[in-house]
């Protein structure tokens, strides 16, 4: 799913589920290499967390607000707050760990 400056608050900040935002750009080769990994994550975490993409060149307000300086920047939001962030094309296990941590933080103690 793609988000924009106009839909970011509703789709990301207001989400009950953790959201991994891929801040990417068309001109960024690592961004394109990472796309299949993010598609796989979206399938694996369907119903528990969301994975969305934001084109940095088309959405300058959000990029400025979150001080995104390099592509790709992968940021996990939980209840409107940044809970994890990494810059660069990172391996699938690291992205899983970020989402798992965000999910665990949302569970009530037993």
Image (cartoon, rainbow, N blue to C red):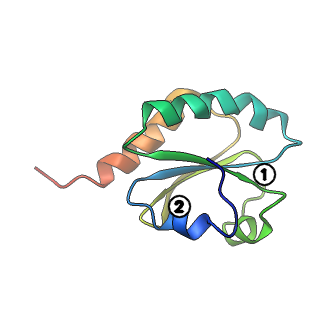
Q: Of all residues shown, which one is farthest toward the right?
A: 27
Badge 1 is on which residue?
70
For marks 1 and 2 on the same chain, the one whose residue lies earlier in the sequence: 2
User: Is 1 in front, or is 27?
Assistant: 1
Which residue shows up at 67% across the image and 70% down it? 6
**Mark 1 secondary-structure assignment:** loop
Q: Position of residue 105 (x, y in %)?
A: 31, 53
Badge 2 local density, few (<14 within 10 Å), some, or many (20+)? Answer: many
Judging depth in this view, the residue of 38 and 3 nearest the camera is 3
Vertical comparison of 99 with 66: above or below: above
**Left or right position of 54 against 47:** right
Along the horizontal axis of the image, is 76 left or right of 100? right
Residue 100 location, quadrant? top left
Q: Helix or strand or loop: what does disc 2 sit on? A: helix
- Bin the neighbour count of mark 1 within 10 Å (Cα to Cα): few under 14, some 14-19, many 20 and up: few
Residue 48 spot, x, y in % from top left? 37, 44
Give the vertical position of 53 relative to 91 (above or below).
Answer: below
Q: Residue at x 30, y 55 (%)?
A: 106
Please give left or right for residue 23 compared with residue 21 in the image: right
Question: Mark 1 to mark 2: distance in Å?
Answer: 20 Å
Picture disc at residue 12 = 2
Q: Quadrant of residue 4?
A: bottom right
Label count reads: 2
Query: Decide: marks 1, 2 in contact (CB < 8 A)?
Result: no
Image x and y of residue 53, in percent? 66, 48
* Residue at image point 48% right, 31% down: 43
Look at 44% across and 30% down and name the residue there: 44
Q: In this rendering, which labeled residue sits more in front, label 1 or label 2?
A: 2
Q: Position of residue 34 (x, y in %)?
A: 69, 32
């Amino acid at each position: 799913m793609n988000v924009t400056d106009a839909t970011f608050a509703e789709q990301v900040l207001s989400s009950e589920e953790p959201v991994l935002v891929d801040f990417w750009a068309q001109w960024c080769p690592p961004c394109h290499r990472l796309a299949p990994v993010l598609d796989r994550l979206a399938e694996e975490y369907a119903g528990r967390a969301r994975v969305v993409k934001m084109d940095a060149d088309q959405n300058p307000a959000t990029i400025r607000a979150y001080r995104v300086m390099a592509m790709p920047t992968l940021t996990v939001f939980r209840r409107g707050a940044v809970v994890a962030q990494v810059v660069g094309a990172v391996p699938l296990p690291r992205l899983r760990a970020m989402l798992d941590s965000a999910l665990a933080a949302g569970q009530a103690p037993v």
